[in-house]
Image (cartoon, rainbow, N blue to C red):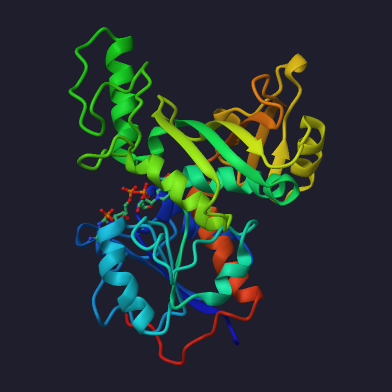
Amino acid sequence: MENGYRVAVVGATGQVGTLMLALLRERGLPIEELVPFASERSVGRELDSGLVVRGLSDESIQGFDVALFSAGGSTSGEWAPKFAATGAIVIDNSSRWRMQDDVPLVVSEVNPQALQAHHGIIANPNCSTMQMVVALKPLHEDAGIERLVISTYQAVSGTGKRAVDELLDQSHALLHEQDIPSPSAYAHQIAFNALPHAGSFAPGDDHTDEERKLINETRKILEDPDIRISATCVRVPVVHGHSEAVNVQTRRELSPERARELLAAAPGVSVLDDPDAALYPLAINAAGNDGVFVGRIRRDPGHERALDMWIVADNLRKGAATNAVQIAELLHERGLLHTQSAPSAA
Ligand SMILES: NC(=O)c1ccc[n+]([C@@H]2O[C@H](COP(=O)([O-])OP(=O)(O)OC[C@H]3O[C@@H](n4cnc5c(N)ncnc54)[C@H](OP(=O)(O)O)[C@@H]3O)[C@@H](O)[C@H]2O)c1
């Protein structure tokens, strides 16, 4: 590699794509050319960086070394294999490929070894799974996780920009004693409310797809199909930052002190845990940060081998964009990313 890689960002005008573009420019990956792609609606639009958005076509996707996708499952379903067929490595934020056996599902601090076995597409986990496994990995290695009981408190930005607008519009209307616009991003009013309905219910399933993702993806990433998991995913009127109350039951004894020690030494984790000083992770403080924050670590009085904890991270950063960029960096560091000779199409 002489000058750097040719990098495509698909979904570059969205919340996650915008952050991926910024992180790619700020961090260390050597880049020769960075090209934003989005839907036909945005083709020709000049972004703040001066880059001009391109449309996806068989010609325009040629010559890239790596493509970071955040444009939803159907775009990934159609275009990720096409990019991979050109020789690019795809890092995909959607849920489209995550549970496929030959697609590694990678969290940079947790299972980087899984990258070795990729076949052109690498999946980035769901945001609530991502932050949780970063914190759980050191505990699992030390004491073996037997069972998890999870309640999430998820920010509206996890649904997309239109959900952020909906929360702000409803809040404004309520505070100004105006009629509330009808909900469209969610089944019910999200402002000043908590919805036990993050994600959607498939016909006949009493869990949301978000809850299923949390269960299935956690087992795949921790490479342990025996972990028993109960999950309730709740949408709350927070713009950025998912919070999670997690009850962790281990196979072997694990004290709160030992858990704190393990977490303090874990990559990507910061422990904020001093209840007397009202110190614990908060979504408003995690927003804009790349790390995972853990606090309220305590013994579960109802079980001798279980701890309770509170895990918070920025869902758009570590929950999506940051991890995708970290995967590209890991591929580079491990010699798994190669430049192609053909130039990218204009
Ligand atoms: N938000 C999160 O916390 C989070 C976390 C993890 C993963 N993800 C995943 O990341 C993806 C994007 O999320 P987001 O919150 O960034 O959504 P978003 O703000 O709604 O952005 C969607 C992006 O996809 C593009 N797009 C839509 N249809 C397209 C098409 N047919 N061809 C090409 N591009 C198309 C949009 O382009 P236009 O501007 O032209 O419409 C836009 O750039 C989703 O798959 C989501 O599940 C999100």
**Is 302 positioned to the left or the right of 182 in the image?**
right
Residue 25 visible in the current orientation: no
Residue at x 23% of width, y 28% of height: 187
Residue 102 visible in the current orientation: yes
Residue at x 40% of width, y 29% of height: 234
Quadrant position of the N terminus in the picture: bottom right
Quadrant position of the C terminus in the picture: bottom left
Question: Looking at the image, is 117 positioned above or below residue 168?
Answer: below
Name the residue at the bottom extreme.
Answer: 341
Q: Provide residue 138's location: percent of width, then percent of height.
A: 71, 48
Front-lying residue, 15 or 156:
156
Front-lying residue, 41 or 305:
305
Question: Looking at the image, is 28 positioned above or below residue 178?
Answer: below
Location of residue 100 by image quarter: bottom left
Q: Provide residue 318's location: percent of width, then percent of height.
A: 55, 48
Front-lying residue, 48 or 25:
25
Q: Provide residue 330's location: percent of width, then percent of height.
A: 62, 69
